[in-house]
Structure formats: C-alpha cells, structure tokens
Image (tube, coloured by chain):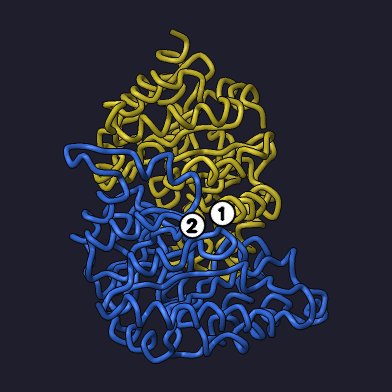
Chain colours: A yellow, B blue
Amino acid sequence: MKKQSITAEIFSKKSYLCIGLDTDWRKLPPCVHKEKDPIFAFNRRIIDATANHCVAYKLNLAFYESAGPKGWESLAQTLAYIPKNIFTIADAKRGDIGNTSDLYAYTFFKQYPFQAVTVSPYMGKDSIEPFLNYADKWTILLALTSNRGSEDFQHLVVGADNKPLYQVVVERAMQWGSSEQLMFVVGATQPEGVAAVRRLAPDYFLLVPGYGAQKGDLEAVSKAGLTRFGGLLVNASRAILYASSDNNFDKEAQKQAQAIAMQMSYYLEKYACQ
Amino acid sequence: MKKQSITAEIFSKKSYLCIGLDTDWRKLPPCVHKEKDPIFAFNRRIIDATANHCVAYKLNLAFYESAGPKGWESLAQTLAYIPKNIFTIADAKRGDIGNTSDLYAYTFFKQYPFQAVTVSPYMGKDSIEPFLNYADKWTILLALTSNRGSEDFQHLVVGADNKPLYQVVVERAMQWGSSEQLMFVVGATQPEGVAAVRRLAPDYFLLVPGYGAQKGDLEAVSKAGLTRFGGLLVNASRAILYASSDNNFDKEAQKQAQAIAMQMSYYLEKYACQ
C-alpha cells in the first residue's frame, strides 16, 4: 500500500486508528471456544465490527506463536480476512544478521503477506536492509517504545550527537529508507517523543502504540504528530478487544473503536491541516 | 540446566562448541527431500553426527518460522530429539512490552521447552524480566553482535558513563539477572568486545556467534573469554551444516565439528585454567 493510499484512507474514514489484534487465547470469551479456530473466530467478529472505524490492523506475533503451529494458521486466516483497503502490520520486532533477516522478511512479506513488519534497530543497518529491500512493503522501526523500559537505553544521550539514542536511531534510519517505505514506532505514553520524532522526520508515518490500556494521551499525541498527510497510526488493543468478555464482545469493541474514531475525526480537523 | 552442569559438560567433552541448527529449507540436500519432514530429517542426522562434539544446539527461529506452520513442527521434533545433556537455545531475539514478553517467554520455555532464549535489549528492563522470571531457564541478552551493523548503535558512546552502549547494556542487565540465569551475546568477529564483556561480567557465560562463515577468530575469542568455569559457548552454523551438499553431509558436518572441538580442547587447556 502506497503512502498516499494510507493518507487517503485516513481522511476518508476520518480515523487514524490501528487496532491491535493481540488476541490472547487465554482470554477468549466462552462463546468462541466451540469454533474450530477460536482465535480466528474472535478476530473475524472483531474485524467485522470495527473495519469501518480503523485504517490498520496490527497482529502482535507473541499472541499467535504462543498458541503453537495452529496459532500461525489463525494468523494466516486473519490476515486473509482483513479487507484489502486496510493496512496490515506484523508486530514482530524482529532483527538479525543479514542472511537471517532475509528470512524474517520473507516470512512476514511473502509467507504471510503483511503490508508492514516492525523491526528492532539494535543490530543496525544490515539487519534492517533485508526488510527495506521489499520496496512495495513497509518497515516499521522501533524508536521510542511505550513501556517503562524505554528509559533504560532509548533515552541515553549519545556522545558526539548529544541526543538521546532513539533520536539517533531515527536520523540514521532515515538515510536507509525513505518515507515511502519506512515508519517509526513512538509510544503514546511519550508525546514529547512524538513531537521530537515529528521534527526530525516530518515526512514519515509514525506508528503509536500505548493508547488505551497503557494510558497514552490521544490529544497530546495527535497534536504532536498529525500532519497534512495524516502521518499517524495510533494503536489500541486491549481497550477494544476486551471491552466485554461476553458474547457481545464485538458490539462493545465496535463502540470503543467508534468512540476513538470520533475523537480522531475531531483531532484531524483541529491539527492535521495546520 | 544449571551453570555448573554446563561447565561440567564443557570440561568433560573438552568442547565449548554450540552448533547452530540454522536449517535453511532452501538449501537442504536432495536426499532428505523424500522424508516426511525434511527439516527434521536433516537435523536428526546432524545431531546424531555431532552430539559428541558439542555442548549446545542453537535453533535460529527465522529458519523455522519462514517454513510456515510445519516449520514449527520441525522445531518441536528437533528440540525433543536433542539429548538431554546438551543445552538448547532458541535464537529468537525477541523482546516486547511486559505482558507480551510474558507470552514470548511462555512460547520458548513452555510451548517449546528450550533451556534458553536470546532477547534484544532495546526495550529495556520490563521487556526482559518476563524471561528472567523463569528462574530455571536462561535469558541470553544481545550485547555486541557479530555483524557490521553492530557499529551503528552498539558502539555508540553513551551518557554519563562515557562507555559504548553494549557495555552499558551488560552493566545494567547484570543488576537484573544473576550469572545463574543470564548470559550475553558477543560476536566472535569482535574479540576485543569479548575481552571487554569478560572484564565487566567475569562470572557470566557468553554466547559467541560469528565463528566459521562469519570469520571470527577462535583463538582470540577463546583467549579473551575462557574462564575457570568455561564461560564460553562459541557457535558455528553454516560451516558445519553445509560442509557438504551431498548425502554424506552428516559425515562432513561431523568432521568439521570434531576439528573445531579439537582446537577447543587445546584452548581450554591453554586459557581456561589460568
């Protein structure tokens, strides 16, 4: 999916919501247990209920691979079920030496044809290039994450640059991939980080997790990150997926997604067209 | 497996060789294609041929997950086949926010009962703790990797410490996990890095990839890293697995493993007992 198509989808739906299909097989409502593939059955109902209110779905691999080989079947089924106008992200946080990253890229771009995959920067350029070599796909690099542990290394000030590590990561990575194929992860819990990355990388999309259960501030993030081309994908997972644990889970998920999208519609008008 | 058991295995076998079962389904010799599970058939013959010469097997997940759901079946079969006295490592380089890392830990310690898993440090303490919570398992943290991209961020001098990032990673992580449950990855291509980490973490095991196809210097690494308790697991993958592409691949793999183990026996005597 091209950058301009993502932008078009955002302004058409008036939403930059990404829904994290972090479907925890330990938390599935009883009503889907009788289905042949409970994880997919749950996801299908969530997708049916929310597809009009979001522009992306993000599948965190931990939830699927922890279910064993059948978890990967659920992943494939879910990916195939997502409407084609919606952006798909494998939240895998992979990264390895070149010949190994090649295979990870194959896994998430070919074996399971996602539009995008998240990648960890720690191993540097040659661990990321194999993903960028897929010019029609997206590489989403961790910059500043939403968790407390982001303080441990990402905020360390780097020597000669006199900047925090996450900003050095963004600056270097911009030399490796254009804004047509590279995005950055910046946690919703750190709106000042969103603002800093937006200044460094004005043309790049940012994937912003940590809204909802992790208590990120949507307005602060939107103000700091929205641009004329949209520029943000703000993710919520648990707040939508587990809005109810009853058979009406999809209706409650829809209400949550719709409520978030309505806020986003307001922020798009307020901040995206400045 | 306890630290003292790994040490005992090293001095008993006079080897600190870890064999990377990075079994690439695109490179399998024709003779295994007729087997029901070609990846496992290949691995079984490699294990039969090399188990006397190594103390650990490391399975890089990229090779298994790129083969689709059946790749995970091959992984499970291989893991179950490895003799119980040999240490097993899931080279997964995972890491995510706490509740998600919980599930990654479950995957590689319970769903697939490896002894150890490799983890990326970028997301900090709360991304690593869920692995360390399994006190009878091992967490192996990336510190200084063997690839060229290690220059990009790992060698950056950071913060008040005025030290390269990989050393800060080692120092902080030592506060999170003891040498009975935490190891560090340091690439064989950087023996001075092995020496530096050995100085910082004298009691910790180091997993050293990059020997063989990546041209790491075994003697320099051994001199820098061996200790009274052994302290090193030096990994070779391609140099052993693909020593021959014919039906005699296991015999050739055995010769390679044996030759490396013989060198190691010499270095153990020379450097481990100082």
What percent of the width, then of the height, locates residue A84?
69, 38
Amino acid type at mark 2: Thr
What percent of the width, then of the height, locates residue B1?
35, 84
Q: Check if mark 1 and mark 2 are on a common chain.
A: yes
Image position of A247 (left or right of A37): left
Contact check, label 1 and label 2, Cβ < 8 Å: yes
Image position of B224 (left or right of A261): left
Image quadrant occupied by the C terminus of chain B: bottom left
Q: Residues within 10 Å of mark 1 (few under 14, many from 20)?
A: many
Between A240 and B110, the one lying in front of the other is B110
Mark toward the start of the polypeptide (1 vs 2): 2
What chain does badge 1 belong to?
A
Q: CA distance from mark 1 to mark 2?
A: 7 Å
Q: Is residue A269 visible?
A: yes
- The residue indicated by pointer 1 is A43
Amino acid type at mark 1: Asn
Q: Quadrant of residue B12?
A: bottom left
The image shows residue B185, relative to residue B86, as above or below, that is above
What percent of the width, then of the height, locates residue A184?
46, 33
| The disc label shown at residue B138, or none | none
Q: Is residue A78 visible?
A: no
Image position of A1 (left or right of A186): right
x 54%, y 81%: residue: B79
- The residue indicated by pointer 2 is A23
Image position of A152 (left or right of B28): left
The image shows residue B71, relative to residue A147, as above or below, that is below
The image shows residue A6, relative to residue B169, as above or below, that is above
Q: Secondary structure at mark 2?
A: loop
What chain does badge 2 belong to?
A
